[in-house]
Structures are given as structure tokens and as C-alpha cells.
């Protein structure tokens, strides 16, 4: 048996009812940490000029005679 007045009041139709709570705003989504960097276009390396041919090294002068005694001098 339904008794009038014992049911919960409908907040939309009952007079004098408190106003419904405002809707909770949605939480904003965080931005991505870093935007993806575009792939740089590889630049071709600059052409290097060919190396000039190295001149022949000058022949080194013969070494002066060492003042140290030679082995055959010590053996005597």
C-alpha cells in the first residue's frame, strides 16, 4: 500500500525543493609533453676539394757519425 507523502520528493517537480547541484566540469586533458619534432631533411655534405698531392719529402741528410764506440771496437 502506497501512503502519500512517504515517497522521496522529485527535485524536478516538487515545489520548494533545493536546486540540483551544478554539473561537475570535465577535467581538461593535459597537453602532450612535447610535440613530435619533424624529421629534418638531411643536408648533403659539402663536396671536399681533393687533397693536393704531397711533394716528395727531401732526402734527409745522412746521420753524422755517432761519437759512441761501436760494438766491434769494444770487442777488441
Image: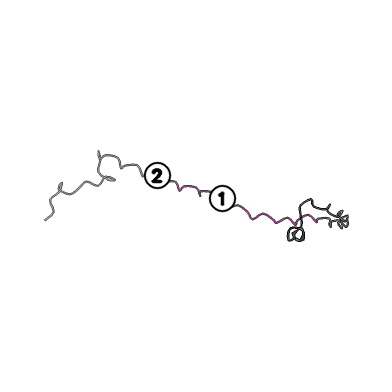
- Front one among 31 and 12: 31
Look at the magenta stretch and give its main secondary structure: loop
Residue 25: numbered disc: 2
Q: Nearer the viewer, mark 1 or mark 2?
A: 1
Secondary structure under the numbered disc 2 in the rendered image: loop
- For the N terminus, the image quarter is bottom left
- For the C terminus, the image quarter is bottom right
On the image, the x and y values in percent for residue 9 come to: 22, 46
Residue at image point 83% right, 53% down: 65
- Front one among 24 and 75: 75
On the image, the x and y values in percent for residue 20 come to: 30, 42
Secondary structure under the numbered disc 1 in the rendered image: loop
On the image, the x and y values in percent for residue 73 come to: 77, 58
Colour scheme employed for the rendering of this structure: one colour
- Front one among 42 and 54: 54
Q: Please give left or right for residue 11 compared with residue 71 in the image.
A: left
Q: Which residue is mark 1?
A: 35
Residue at image point 57% right, 53% down: 36
Label located before the other in sequence (1 or 2): 2
Is the residue 56 above or below the residue 17 in the image?
below
Disc 2 crowd rating (10 Å Cα; few below 14, some 14-19, many 20+) is few
- Front one among 66 and 38: 66
Residue at image point 74% right, 58% down: 74
On the image, the x and y values in percent for residue 70 come to: 76, 57
> Which residue range is magenta in the image?
25-47
Residue at image point 44% right, 46% down: 28
Instruction: Please tell me whether residue 31 belongs to the stretch shown in magenta.
Output: yes
Is the residue 2 above or below the residue 21 in the image?
below
Disc 1 crowd rating (10 Å Cα; few below 14, some 14-19, many 20+) is few
Q: Please give left or right for residue 50 compared with residue 37 in the image.
A: right
Amino acid at each position: 500500500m502506497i501512503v502519500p507523502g512517504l515517497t522521496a520528493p522529485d527535485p524536478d517537480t516538487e515545489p520548494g525543493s533545493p536546486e540540483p547541484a551544478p554539473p561537475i566540469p570535465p577535467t581538461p586533458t593535459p597537453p602532450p609533453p612535447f610535440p613530435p619534432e619533424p624529421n629534418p631533411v638531411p643536408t648533403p655534405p659539402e663536396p671536399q676539394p681533393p687533397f693536393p698531392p704531397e711533394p716528395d719529402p727531401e732526402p734527409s741528410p745522412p746521420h753524422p757519425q755517432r761519437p759512441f764506440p761501436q760494438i766491434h771496437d769494444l770487442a777488441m
